[in-house]
Image: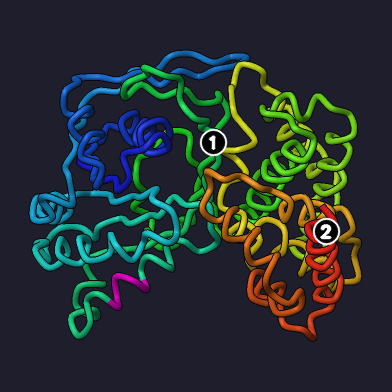
Amino acid sequence: MKAVHFGAGNIGRGFVGLLLHEGGYEVVFSDVAGALVDAINATEQYTVHEAGPGGIDRVVTGYRAINSAENPDAVAEEVATADVVTCAVGPNVLRFIAPAIVDGLTRRDPALPPLKVMACENAIGATDQLKAEIEKAAADDAPLLLERAVFANTAVDRIVPAQPEGAGVDVTVEPYFEWAIEQGPFGGDLPRIPGAHFVDDLGPFIERKLFTVNTGHAATAYFGAQAGIDRISDALADPAIASRVGAALEETSAMLAAVHGLDEDELAEYRATILDRFRNPELVDTVQRVGRQPLRKLSRHERFIGPAAQAAQRGLSTEALLAAVGAALAFDDPADEQSVQMQQRLRTEDAADLAASVTGLEPAHPLFDRVREVFAARQQELRTA
């Protein structure tokens, strides 16, 4: 069996690639970073170090890597004969990998079983987005080529921090992981992925993960940055920050219970597990890494505005989530392009126009006025600084 995985970075090697290897797949990594591809191909094995209670070292073998920028034809050939295609490249990059998948499907023997395609991104419906990009790239051939693949959305969860100096292609991760996959598209022919669980309705799993793990992680980063704290674990050791993050997650849980009917006691236990993961002192993670790309994280269906909008529509509390939005607007990292852009826009644009542009909320939305006030408050801070 063979799996092609787009994105040979830390998540690709330390999470998706690891589980595919443990499922018995030969793993072919595709990436545009030439130095990384060369480093992977120079090794016969790499180690995934699980840092924290219960963690062990896992050795990965049976892989190779292709530089897709230099050799797209080779990537297409691998896709043509693969059993599974996965990716962890970021939602904005899906359109760039779609042509390679189209080329592979064009070359694929129609007699082969359908290619199993799963996008492993921190986004709702990422595989649907990838399928739409494939359909666009295939143009008139789309109806024929889409018959040669099945597409399943997934929800993935594993903290993979910035890696220590000199790690090579080894990866340090947390012991905990979750990979939920919708099973309907496979028609009973499920991919072999140890530890993954297949569900009928992925929606609640995706939103529970995004609006607990991602919301809590980002909130910790932004409140920590405001307090001048460097590490995520140190930020949550501050009782004031822990209280603010906990309050934001209580609001997302209330929304999840209202929208999806999830059990409140189980949500409370899930929140506690998530916060314990962030407190792991052996997982060296920084507020700068977690807080990067604040404009994306403040967009309509992301970790703050997404749950707050649904909560506001139901008359639920959003104060703690809005406090996290305020902290995100204060995130000022000269090394992060989106942070620099955001601070510039806060200094030059009208609060209402900027709030609408960044968050995607319509002015008539019940959350909009409060969000506009948060943007205006940050602008006032900048004027008086």
State the extent of the magenta-drawn residues as a range.
Answer: 132-136
Q: Residue at x 33, y 33 (%)?
A: 23
Disc 1 to disc 2, C-alpha distance: 26 Å
Can you tell which quarter of the image residue 346 is in? bottom right
Q: Nearer the viewer, residue 28 or 216?
A: 216
Q: Is residue 34 above or below residue 239?
A: below
Task: Judge left or right: residue 343 versus residue 262.
Answer: left
In the foreground, 206 or 220? 220
Picture disc at residue 158:
1
Label 1 secondary element = loop
Residue that carries the numbered disc 2 in the rendered image? 322
Of all residues, the one furthest to the front in this rendering is 384
Locate residue 12, reporting x and y percent.
37, 38
Q: Position of residue 77 (x, y in %)?
A: 9, 53
Amino acid on which disc 2 is placed: Leu
Could you classify mark 1 by the number of other residues whose Cα lies within 10 Å: few (under 14), some (14-19), or many (20 or more)? some
Position of 76 relative to 284 (above/below): below
Amino acid at circle 1? Arg
